[in-house]
Amino acid sequence: MDFPPKKAEQLVKRISELLKSRQETIAVTEAACGGLLSSYLVSVPGASEWFDGGTLVYSLKSRLKLSGWDSKDIENYTGPSANVALRLARNLRLELGSTYTLSETGYASSVQNNPEAASKTGVVYYGISGPHRDLCRTHTTGSDDRCANMQQFALKGLEFLLEELERSEKDPEQHKKKKAKSEEPTING
């Protein structure tokens, strides 16, 4: 069995190098990936130096218990979106105090009894919350293959995270004042 896939391994090695060199950490909240992001991240030796952990919030019940949501949030929930992804990332960052958090939520396959969601199959939303900014991204696979979508969602999430880490590395202003690992993050917006 080839795990993780070569592309994921390459991405995670670079993510690991950047986080270790800067003494920073990452945590993830997953939904449609079903734990693949966390699995890919911890597949690299030494991940415990920079991986704080993660949550799998596949159901609304788990979001209520694990993501800082309340019953009103559940009542108003209309499905995965960029706002939901960003909120998941922000909440986990507050909970774990990680330097960065990455979240994803999407539609890996069609949703039974929900024709409106059927048009969104293969759509995933990502959120990153970091020390200097929060951002979202949407990716569409164009596929209705559940397992292929889950794998592509995880790979695209790693690519998004790596892009943000590399961008922050190139911005010297972001690293002039190094924040302590345990410092509570500030949420923008």
Image (spheres, helix red, strand yellow):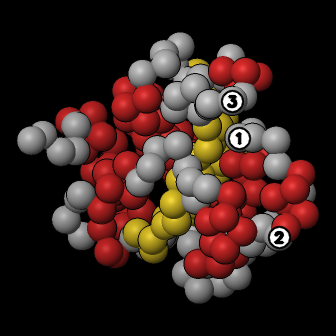
Numbered disc 2: secondary structure: loop
Residue at 24% x, 58% y is 43
Give the CA separation, mark 1 to mark 3.
16 Å
* Above or below 78: residue 169: below
Q: Is residue 79 visible?
A: yes
Closer to the chain start, of discs 2 and 1, is 2
- Position of residue 117 measured from the top left corner of the image (x, y, whole percent): 71, 26
Task: Report the residue that reaches farthest toward the top.
Answer: 142
Disc number placed over residue 80 in the picture, else none: 1
Q: Which mark is residue 39?
A: none
- Judged left or right of residue 94, residue 29 is left
Residue 15, how many percent across, how many down? 38, 52
Q: Circle 1 sits in a helix, a strand or a loop, which is it?
A: loop
Q: Is residue 10 visible?
A: no
What residue is pinned by disc 3? 113
Where residue 124 sits, quadrant-wise, is top right
Q: Is residue 17 above or below residue 70?
A: above
Q: Secondary structure at mark 3?
A: loop
For disc 2, the neighbor class at 10 Å (few under 14, some 14 to 19, many from 20) is: few
Q: Nearer the viewer, residue 170 or 80?
A: 80
Front-most of 106 and 71? 71
Instruction: Name which residue type carries label 1.
Output: Pro
